[in-house]
Image (tube, rainbow, N blue to C red):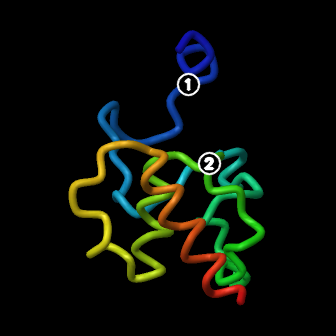
Amino acid sequence: MFVLFYLGWPWPSQDHVFPGTKTRFALQNGVETYPPTSTGAGTDNEDSNNCVDFSTLSIKELKVAISRANLQDQTQGFSEKREFVELLTTNANKNAN
């Protein structure tokens, strides 16, 4: 937190909230960049999920990937990250074959 106060808060309010569909990103000089495994990088290659290590994604990123794969109905009752990872991995393997 010290770094944020030293460099300043880049958003217009102290309680700035992003939409639930926004994935992890960095903002530098007004430019948003995304980590390589992020599903929010804005590339059209997101359908090649079989090359993504889903275990490295955050819960938020996993939920976005599940939504994009239309698998939401299969997540009812999920409470562990590994359940989301297993669902996406199984789906990616099924689509790869």
Residue in front for this viewpoint, 9 or 93? 93
72 left or right of 31 in image: left
Residue in front for this viewpoint, 34 or 11? 34
Task: Give the image location of residue 67, x and y in percent.
Answer: 40, 74
Query: How packed is label 2: few (under 14 Cα within 10 Å), some, or many (20 or more)?
Result: some
Q: Residue at x 77, y 57 (%)?
A: 36
- The quadrant in which residue 46 appears is bottom right
Q: Secondary structure at mark 2?
A: helix
Q: Residue at x 72, y 52 (%)?
A: 35
Circle nearer the viewer, 1 or 2: 2
Amino acid type at circle 1 is: Gly
24 left or right of 43 in image: left
Task: Give the image location of residue 73, x and y in percent.
Answer: 26, 75
Q: Is residue 3 above or below residue 96?
A: above
Q: Is residue 36 above or below residue 89?
A: above
Q: Which residue lies under the disc numbered 1? A: 8
Query: How packed is label 1: few (under 14 Cα within 10 Å), some, or many (20 or more)?
Result: few
71 left or right of 3 in image: left
Q: Which residue lies under the disc numbered 2? A: 55
Q: Residue furthest top?
A: 2
Amino acid type at circle 2 is: Ser
Residue in front for this viewpoint, 78 or 52? 78
Label located before the other in sequence (1 or 2): 1
The mark found on residue 49 in the picture is: none
Q: CA distance from mark 1 to mark 2?
A: 32 Å
18 left or right of 96 in image: left
Task: Give the image location of residue 77, x and y in percent.
Answer: 22, 55
